[in-house]
Every structure is written in structure tokens, then in C-alpha cells.
Image (tube, rainbow, N blue to C red):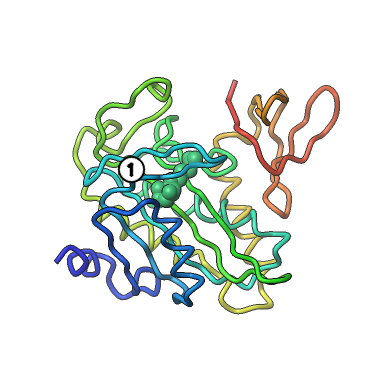
Amino acid sequence: MITEMIREKIGEGVFGRELYYFESVDSTNLAAKKFALDGAAEGSVVLAREQTSGTGRQGREWISEPGKDLACSLILRPAIDPARIGVLSLFASTGVAAALGAMTGMECRCKWPNDVLLGGKKVSGILSESILGGREVRAVVIGIGVNVNRDTFPPPIGDAATSLLLATGRPWEPGDVLARILRELESRYMFPASGRQDEACDAILNEWSERSAVLGREIVVEQGERQLRGRAVSVDADGSLVLETPQGVHHLAAGDVHIV
Ligand code: BTN
């Protein structure tokens, strides 16, 4: 059974202890949100061989090759102020970058808000979605797509994307990639006990900043029709990007970044 093989790889951790596996599903994030509303435990993982409606940020389509790439979603129930929820996206990209960097031995960096770059090209995208109840965070679903064994990307993605296979010249087992990502995420996750969330967020912001592909760089941020060009200087306590432009300093909660 596939789930047993994957469970063996995941080992003893809390993340992945509950595993929901689909041969085909619309989107692991959609499925995870339903499981979360039905009470799924923190650390539950939804994994699919194929997604028929994989979704990226800003409602874009996310395509993964069935059986070759990794598409999964992790359910969290963090003790975190809703105002700082953006930090969890940075948490996710930091953990994924740590996992892929350690596995490949290559430089793996985070591009704000939640892309992971291997050798300067996008190898993974993350979609974090929260379920709020009143002023409380009931659950956060962290959707993770990794290009594992894909060897071509259609235009317009083309040159901007890579896979573990393309970057390293050898195939990888998606189950091993999942197991390593879950281990790296769990080792950084400090939100189950309330009261230490500031410390937890600061640790994430620090590590993300060290792994950042954008801080200190000249970038263009696209927000719909608006384009801002400037230097990325830091991230705020809520995960917003601080951009210095000739017109002033902007604190950006969303946008697409292009490194100049
Ligand atoms: C992005 O780069 O725009 C984010 C892509 C996130 C894709 C993953 S694949 C698993 C999970 N299920 C989805 O439908 N989306 C996320």
C-alpha cells in the first residue's frame, strides 16, 4: 500500500501521523480544508498523486505531473494572533527550503512571499489558507507543491522554473521529499503551546531573512496593475515585505516579486 510506504518514510513525527492519500483529488488544499473543518488533528497531511484543480496563489492554476511531483497539504492549529498569520507562509517556505537544500546540497532560497528557489529558479510554491472562527485561528492549511521529477515546463513558466531532477541530474522519490519536508517543518514549529508566539515568529522571521533571495536586492513588486520598484530591506513582524523606493517606504502584504 502506498500509504504504508509513505508512513514508513515519515517515521514517528506528529506531522504526517494522520495521512489522507488520494490517487486523484481536485486540490489537496480543498480536501485539507474540509478535513480541518471536520476536526482533523494538527499535523494531518493530505497527499495526492494527481490534482485536477491544483491552485496557486491569486487563484492561478498549479500544475504538477501525476506520480512525478509532490502535491500535499499540512493542517496546523497554531496558537497565533490572526494579525501574524502571514508569518506561517514564511515558516513553510523556510522549512521547504531547508529540506530541499539539505537533500540536494544546493543553495535553496526563499522568495517572498512563499516561493522556494533552487539554483535561482522556482522549485516549489506554497499556498497557505486560514480558517478563522471569530477572532481565533481555527486552522491553517499549508499547501506545498514541489517540482520533483518533471523535465519540461511549458511557456510562459519555461526558464523561471526547475525541478529536483533538472537541478541535480538525478530522479528523486516524492515520498522521501515529503518526509524530509515534514521533518524540517516539525522541527521549526513552535506554535502548539500558546504564550511563546512572539519568540516563535521572531525565530521564523530571522531564519527566513537568512535564506531570503530578495532582501538587499533591487526588485519589482506587481500588485495587479500597480508596479513598485525598489530595494527589499526587511520583513515586518506580520510577514509583510518592506520595500524602499524613491517615493518612500512601502509595507507590502501581497504581490508578485521579480528580482531585477
Ligand atoms: C504558488 O506558487 O502559486 C503556490 C502553489 C501551491 C501549490 C500546492 S500543490 C498542493 C496544494 N494544493 C493546491 O491546490 N495548491 C497547493
Q: Secondary structure at mark 1?
A: loop
Q: Name which residue lies at 38% across and 62% down.
A: 182
Q: Residue 150 at x, y = what percent?
A: 26, 35
Q: Residue at x 40, y 52 (%)?
A: 27
Q: Is residue 157 left or right of residue 76?
A: left
Q: Is residue 71 left or right of residue 202?
A: left
Judge whether residue 97 can be spotted in this image.
Answer: no
* Front residue (pair 72, 249): 72
Image quadrant occupied by the C terminus:
top right
Question: Is the residue indicated by label 1 positioned so its CB lies within 8 Å of ligand 1?
Answer: no
Quadrant in which the N terminus appears: bottom left
User: Where does the image place residue 169, in percent across and percent down from the top left?
Assistant: 21, 32
Q: Residue furthest right?
A: 247
Q: Residue at x 45, y 56 (%)?
A: 29
Residue type of the residue flagged with mark 1? Gly
Please tell me how crowded label 1 is: few (under 14), some (14-19), or many (20+) other residues with Cα within 10 Å: few
Say which quarter of the image contains residue 217. top right
Question: In the rendering, at what x and y percent does residue 28 appear?
Answer: 39, 56
Q: Quadrant of residue 221?
A: top right
x, y percent for residue 242: 74, 39
Q: Which residue is mark 1?
A: 105
**Taking 123 as reference, is 83 left or right?**
right
